[in-house]
Amino acid sequence: MKQLLTLALGLWLTACSSSIDQELFPQPGARNVNPDTRLSILFDSTPTVGKAGMIRVWDAATDTVVDSLDLSIPAGPTEPRKLPKAPYTWEPYSYDQPRKTNADTKPGTPSGVAEPTSDEYQLTIIGGFTDGFHFHPILVRENRAEIYLHHNLLQYGKEYYVTIDEGVLTTEDGSFHGIKKENKWRFKTKKEGPAADMRRLEVNADGTADFSTVQGALDYIPDFNTEPYTIYIHNGDYEELVYFRSKRNLTIEGESREGVKVHYPNNEVFNPYPKNVATNEWPGTFPSRRAAFMADNCEDLTMRNLTIATDLKGQAEGLLVMGERILLDEVTIIGSGDALQANGSVYLNKCRIIGDGDSILGRGPCFFNACELESRGPFMWIRNTDANHGNVFVRCHFEGIGKHAIIARTNPKYDYCEAVLIHCTMNNIHPIGWMGLPDKLVKQRYWEYDSRDTAGNPIDYSQRLKGSRRLDGEKDKELIASYMDPAFVLGGWNPMQ
């Protein structure tokens, strides 16, 4: 009998060793885990993600599944689609109402007039946006597999265990055969969240703060909050798709600009906007979901000391904002195609914006102070109407990459486009400066004053397109002074106050 027991124990240990030999996070037996935690497995070599099998998280008290990821479902589209034209609607996403919870809807349930999202790809609800985002259930980075659960399904004060089917992840040596219940990858979440009166929330990817993800902290703040909140992000790598809306008086601050990076592999192909929406330019909200970091219908929002980036090429903003009185202070924004889309009054101070063309998109008004901009194509495609100013740059630097960098391009259907440069420097910009301008502008404003090269020499304006205008320091003195005033550009808002 003793020999049989010894043999049985040996077989059990052999069956379990392929799982328990890996480094797991949260660690088996961990307590006080944040409900927004990611699951992570560190291997001795780079694992491969399979095309079938399930990852499940179970309630340990009831042995019921609380979340599951089906690897047979593709993450998202990889080829662009043709979108039909559709009429405007003025109540598309009920942006003036508090968000629904995951208990109310399932991913892909339209929150307005959008058609239901197809369930042929992975879907999750982020920030209450029930139309759903495509996402990667597993992302492999070097030897680590990061597992992304659906949002807001884990709860405080619970014990969970994780199972992973064989074939979900494989290694070169074939030693990993999944994780079973008996492998005991169990952990307990914190008994409760931050106190109701806490207005400063901290985020740390290692799980030692109030939240493990930026999105987790944002979801904790109620929509249309009347009390100011601050989210402080510790240095770390935050690979997550961020979307939030209807926040007020919110500050998002990183520990350091280079040390905090929020990024995700997203673009217009992977997360296209709804088929029955013709454009993303309506009041108060937008259906676009292609950026890495999206702030929708927000007011009095401040972001500082962090880096935001998309990890895919194509139409893919690093940051997309819609709202009023948005302050970006020493933020690095990296995108492809469009790097920053800004709709509403935005003030940018000492920011760095890197894109591949049309790097700044939106309707304004935007005031750029002492910012650095890099682009392979047009630095901007401004679309403001006569209701507000467009893009104004004061003491900024424009760095062209390649042979096709120009300041801006225009489109005849946007009659009131405005781009004004004052005391700016530029390098490797095509001498025509602008693209697509008529010889005489009536309503559009493409103006420059005191543009210089990096050595401090005045720019040669001789080849500038005729439709652009070089302001005169004496004749246009009052006009130049007005455009150097943020309040003049931003509809009366002076962020410096």
Image (spheres, rainbow, N blue to C red):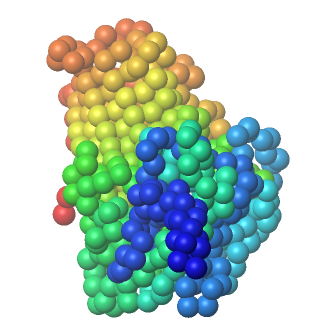
Determine which quarter of the picture holds residue 252.
Answer: bottom left
Q: Which residue does the image show at 73% across and 38% down from the upper left?
A: 79
Residue 128, x across and y down, in percent: 58, 73
Relative to residue 146, is residue 248 depicted above or below?
Answer: below
Q: Nearer the viewer, residue 287 or 446?
A: 287
Residue 64, x across and y down, in percent: 65, 84
Count numbered badges in the picture. 0
Q: Nearer the viewer, residue 315 or 387?
A: 315
Quarter containing the C terminus: bottom left
Relative to residue 40, is residue 351 depicted above or below?
Answer: above
Q: Which residue does the image show at 23% across and 30% down from the upper left?
A: 423
Determine which quarter of the picture holds residue 165.
Answer: bottom right
Whether residue 7 appears in this view of the structure is yes
Determine which quarter of the picture holds residue 1.
Answer: bottom right
Relative to residue 157, is residue 264 depicted above or below?
Answer: above
Q: Nearer the viewer, residue 160 or 208?
A: 160
Q: Is residue 98 left or right of residue 407?
A: right
Q: Nearer the viewer, residue 336 or 262?
A: 262
Q: Is residue 428 left or right of residue 494?
A: right
Residue 209, x across and y down, in percent: 28, 72
